[in-house]
Image (cartoon, rainbow, N blue to C red):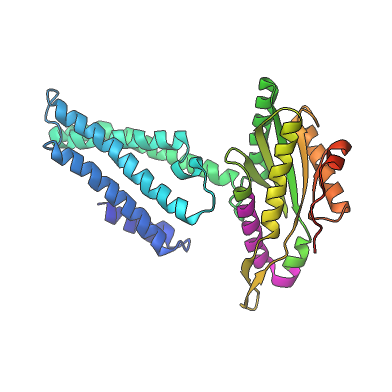
Amino acid sequence: MIALVYLHLWQRVWRPTHTPLYRHVYTTATVLLAAGAAHAVVASAGGLPDGPEDVVGVVSVALAVLLYVVVNNILVAAALAVTRDRAGIRELVGRWDDNAVEVATLCMGALAAVALGSTPGLIALVLPPILVLHRAVKVRQLEEEASTDAKTGLLNAAAWQAEAARAVRRAQRSGGSSAVLILDLDHFKLVNDAYGHLAGDVVLAAVAGALRAGVRDQDVVGRFGGEEFVVVLPDLAPGAAGHTQMYEVAERVRKRVAALDVAVRTPDGDGLTVSGLTVSVGAAAVPADGAGLEQVLKAADAALYTAKRDGRNLVRVAGGAAVRDIPAPRAAS
């Protein structure tokens, strides 16, 4: 049944979107192995429970649900760990609400299996909740698609601003500090003019990957539009220590972008590597540079223009004193 369902998904969804076959095969294999582990637990207990007095059978079904989740998550996390640079715990195991929906769906599936084994007519009562959960997952997927920038996989401007506003409000309530970085890819128009807009999209995606790899797990990265990116840094240390953290993250991202070598194809179909990319960064902190998100964004934007005027491929922090105290990184070659 699993093989048939995933074959249908391949034909209707994955193949039209040009998803690599090996990814679909691996995903199908994780589900098959998780289902096999769950089946083994129930089979070792003598099968599905045949009544309320069959405590062992009931426990085996609960363990089957748990084992399915564990096996599936371990296999998926292992694939992510070996294919993504510095993948965080949240990325590896997923969000709490996503896992909660999956566990709820599996519990309903377990109830459906028990009903099918003892009183098949009860399936009619179990299927509607399963369909509702399935619809909830679809709605969540649509919400994620609506909040995601298609070219980079980052949050789009509206979704990022909502996340950033929440981070700033948390900092205000707790008396802590947070920060905003605005990053602009230097001379990106030259990339589009030289290699074409499709190659430019590949470069944007590579820069987005460098940003995600260069920030902390709790930091939120978004695309603000064009070649401009934004990062909100929550939970910074108060005072000068927070400014140091903010600068270190910004400088780490700047160096990662400068080290990129991006393989692209020209409009003629020739393969080549784009290197020498640089990014200018403006940074501002809450509450030092503004009490609200709009004020901090303006301060970070002003610092970004300072970095542009000073020669690009630089990090500049809002506030003249902070900028003077931080050594300037090397200029673009």
Residue 268 sits in quarter: bottom right
Q: State the image coordinates of residue 9 (x, y, percent, origin top left).
A: 37, 56
Task: Out of 318 and 15, give the one closest to the viewer.
Answer: 318
Tell me: 213 left or right of 65.
right
Q: Residue at x 80, y 60 (%)?
A: 332
Residue 152 sits in quarter: bottom right
Whether residue 124 is visible here, answered yes or no, is no
Tell me: 75 left or right of 278.
left
Q: State the image coordinates of residue 299 (x, y, percent, origin top left).
A: 82, 37
Whether residue 69 is visible here, answered yes or no, is yes
Task: Out of 48 and 257, give the one closest to the viewer.
Answer: 257
Q: Residue at x 58, y 45 (%)?
A: 146
Q: Which residues are magenta?
A: 193-211
Task: Examine the structure image and report whether residue 210 is included in the region drawn in magenta.
Answer: yes
Task: Out of 90 and 157, give the one closest to the viewer.
Answer: 90
- The quadrant the C terminus occupies is bottom right
Q: State the image coordinates of residue 252 (x, y, percent, origin top left).
A: 68, 49
Q: Residue at x 42, y 57 (%)?
A: 13
Task: Out of 271 and 311, give the one closest to the viewer.
Answer: 311
Main SS category, magenta section: helix
Q: How many numbered marks appear?
A: 0
Tell me: 201 left or right of 19.
right
Q: Decide: is 91 above or below 124.
A: below
Q: State the image coordinates of residue 198 (x, y, percent, origin top left).
A: 64, 66
Tell me: 209 left or right of 1.
right
Task: Examine the structure image and report whether residue 177 is included in the region drawn in magenta.
Answer: no
